C-alpha cells in the first residue's frame, strides 16, 4: 500500500508494532498516508481506519480504541450482522469474508492482500490498479492470484454507514 501511494506522488509511512508476542498473538501494523511530507515518527494512537484481519479479535481486543469519530472499521467477517452492534452503530463498517476469498482464489487462508481490496473499496484512498506493480514486485509468480483475491474482495465488500451518525 505504501509503495503504491508513494508511486502516485503522495507520502506514506508504514511500520509494524511488535512486542514479545508469540505466534498467533494479536499484533498491530500502521500506515500513514498524506499529500504532505510526514514528519511524525510516533505510534498511531488515533487512527482514521482500523482493519481487523481476524474476526476473533472483536471479542478480545478493543479494536476501536482511539478510532476517530466517523472512523472506518474494515473487518474480515462472514456478515455485517456478525460484527458487534456497538461497532456497527458507531462507525462506518466494511466487511468481507476474506477467509473464503483467500481459500478459493489463493488456495490458502492468508487474508492480507484480500483485506487490501476491502480497505480500498471502503476508503477510496487509492485506485485498486495502483497496487498492481507493488503486488507484482512483492509476490512474483503468485502476483496474479493475489491481485485477483484483492479484486474479488473489492467487488464483494459490503459497506454500512453507522446507525448513530
Image (cartoon, rainbow, N blue to C red):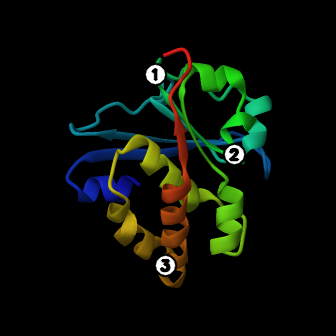
Q: Secondary structure at mark 2?
A: loop
Which of disc 3 and disc 1 is earlier in sequence? Answer: 1
Q: Which residue: 55% across, 67% down?
A: 149
Q: Which residue: 51% across, 63% down?
A: 150
Left or right of 92 in this view: 85: right
Which of discs 2 and 3 lies nearer the camera? The answer is 2
Instruction: Quarter of the image for the N terminus: give it.
Output: bottom left
Q: Which residue is mark 1?
A: 70
Q: Position of residue 29 (x, y in %)?
A: 55, 43
Q: Which residue is mark 2?
A: 77
Q: Nearer the viewer, residue 110 or 32?
A: 110
Left or right of 30 in this view: 112: right
Q: Position of residue 73 (x, y in %)?
A: 56, 34
Relative vertical location of residue 63 with respect to residue 125 in this rendering, above or below: above
Q: Which residue: 70% across, 75% down?
A: 107
**Where residue 144 is drawn, which disc sits there?**
3
Left or right of 45 in this view: 105: right
Dot 2 alpha-carbon crowd within 10 angstroms: few under 14, some 14 to 19, many 20 or more: many
- Residue extending furthest bottom? 141
- Classify residue 27 by image quadrant: top right
Which of disc 3 and disc 2 is earlier in sequence? Answer: 2
Question: Label 1, label 3: how many angstroms apart (C-alpha)?
Answer: 34 Å
Which of disc 2 and disc 1 is earlier in sequence? Answer: 1
Q: Position of residue 74 (x, y in %)?
A: 56, 40
- Classify residue 156 by image quadrant: bottom right
Amino acid at each position: 500500500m505504501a509503495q503504491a501511494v508513494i508511486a502516485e506522488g503522495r507520502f506514506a509511512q508504514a511500520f509494524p508494532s511488535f512486542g514479545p508476542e508469540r505466534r498467533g498473538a494479536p499484533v498491530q501494523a500502521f500506515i500513514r498516508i498524506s499529500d504532505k511530507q510526514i514528519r511524525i515518527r510516533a505510534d498511531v494512537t488515533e487512527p482514521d481506519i482500523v482493519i481487523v484481519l481476524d474476526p476473533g479479535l472483536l471479542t478480545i481486543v478493543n479494536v476501536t480504541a482511539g478510532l476517530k469519530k466517523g472512523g472506518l472499521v474494515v473487518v474480515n467477517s462472514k456478515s455485517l450482522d456478525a460484527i458487534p452492534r456497538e461497532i456497527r452503530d458507531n462507525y462506518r463498517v466494511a466487511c468481507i469474508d476474506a477467509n473464503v476469498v483467500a481459500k478459493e482464489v489463493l488456495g490458502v487462508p492468508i487474508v492480507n492482500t484480500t483485506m487490501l481490496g476491502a480497505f480500498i473499496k471502503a476508503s477510496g484512498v487509492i485506485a485498486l490498479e495502483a497496487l498492481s506493480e507493488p503486488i507484482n514486485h512483492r509476490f512474483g509468480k503468485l502476483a496474479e492470484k493475489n491481485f485477483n483475491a484483492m479484486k474479488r474482495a473489492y467487488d464483494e465488500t459490503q459497506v454500512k454507514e453507522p446507525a448513530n451518525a
